Image (cartoon, rainbow, N blue to C red):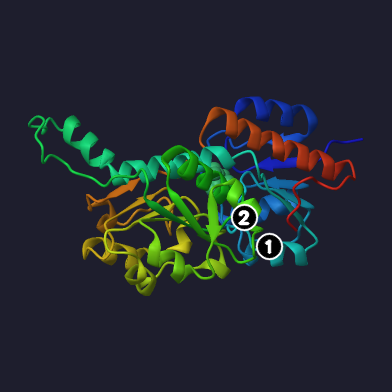
Amino acid sequence: MSRPKILLTRRWPSAVEAVLAERFEATFNTDDLPMLPDAIAEALGTHDAVLPTVSDKLPASVFEGDIRAKVLGNFGVGYNHIDIAAAKAKGIAVTNTPGVLTDCTADIAMLLLLSVARRGGEGERQVRAGEWKGWCPTHMIGTKVTGKTVGIIGFGRIGKAFAQRCHFGFGMDVVFFNRSTVDPAEAARYGARQLATVEEVLAVADFVSLHCPGGAENRHLMNASRFAAMKPGAYLINTARGDVVDEAALISALADGVIRGAGLDVYEAEPQVPEALSGLENVVLLPHLGSATEETRNAMGMKVVDNITAFFEGREPPDRVA
Ligand code: 8YV
């Protein structure tokens, strides 16, 4: 029997590509250049599975032509770059990679929180530029983290892992907003307690960290009025998706001192980062590194392998989202 024909839109960890090459007739993107939607549409017509990443766009238009693909094995937990309804309408299954990137994404959120509060980015820039004039009592004064209140928006796997780090690692009081009610005993395992609204969280948090999905339901959840509702001197951390934040409103809030700083791993139009943002000192900017460790990227790839292997063997893929 011929092996299913699969296409990877980007370069993947080599150990994972090797497994895919053994099991499938695989088309690899050896140049690793992002594929345009037209090329993805063509791939959907010529392959049994397409394996996209967050750097691809799969709007409804890519599903309009002749489709051969039966499954999209997304490399990543977030899938707001895929029009799920359009894929479903064409009978295409979609899978993702939950769980394996929880710790590393929570770690990056902690890195951003600490960096922005303690001015790590600014300090590093100063040393590298040869501009450090030496220690003095008033040099580059930041904000103490230990014991502060962190407000988490979205208490899924990553939100919980972040809460655990904040509470048990840094003695922080942790409150959160989540659409559905979380059992208080479960929340307490992470040192956290649920509040009823986003506004209640913003009113008390010294740091607000976003851990909800991107896409239409949370688009611009953080907007000008919500920045105004944050405590004066508070910070925003975003390791979720760029579209959860109205970036223009964030830039104004940072420039006008409505909030004190931000730590960002994701942006509205990646990889574009507005100059108005990168020109600000009170932001720490990372290039979407949440899951970027050897262990996690390998594990993500192997999850995709498991998902599409199950699919083509007629079993239910473990991480099917559509
Ligand atoms: C991934 C992420 O690197 O999994 C996610 O949702 O945001 C990142 O950690 C990216 O999505 C890969 O497609």
Label 2 sits on residue? 79
Residue 312 in the image: x percent, y percent?
A: 85, 43
Establish if 313 lies above or below 249. Answer: above
Mark 2 belongs to which amino acid? Tyr
**Residue in the picture at 27% in, 42% down:** 118
Work out which residue is located at the far bottom of the displayed protein and give it: 225
Q: Secondary structure at mark 2?
A: loop
Residue 270 in the image: x percent, y percent?
A: 43, 53
Establish if 304 lies above or below 257. Answer: above
Q: Looking at this view, is 298 or 48 the one in front?
A: 298
Label 2: how many residues lie within 10 Å, few (<14), some (14-19) or many (20+)? many
**Residue in the picture at 56% in, 56% down:** 57
Label 1 sits on residue? 84
Label 2 CB less than 8 angstroms from ligand 1? yes
Q: Quadrant of residue 79?
A: bottom right
Label 1 CB less than 8 angstroms from ligand 1? no
**Residue in the picture at 37% in, 46% down:** 147
Decide which of tag 2 and tag 1 comes sooner along the chain. 2
Q: Looking at this view, is 29 or 187 the one in front?
A: 187
Mark 1 belongs to which amino acid? Ile
Q: Quadrant of residue 61?
A: bottom right
Asked if the residue at tag 1 contacts the one at tag 2, i.e. Cβ–Cβ closer than 8 Å, the answer is: yes
Mark 2–mark 1 Cα distance, whole angstroms, equals 8 Å
Residue 137 in sight in this render: yes
The reply, left or right, for residue 311 in relation to residue 77 is right
The reply, left or right, for residue 304 in relation to residue 160 is right
Q: Quadrant of the C terminus?
A: bottom right
Q: Secondary structure at mark 1?
A: helix
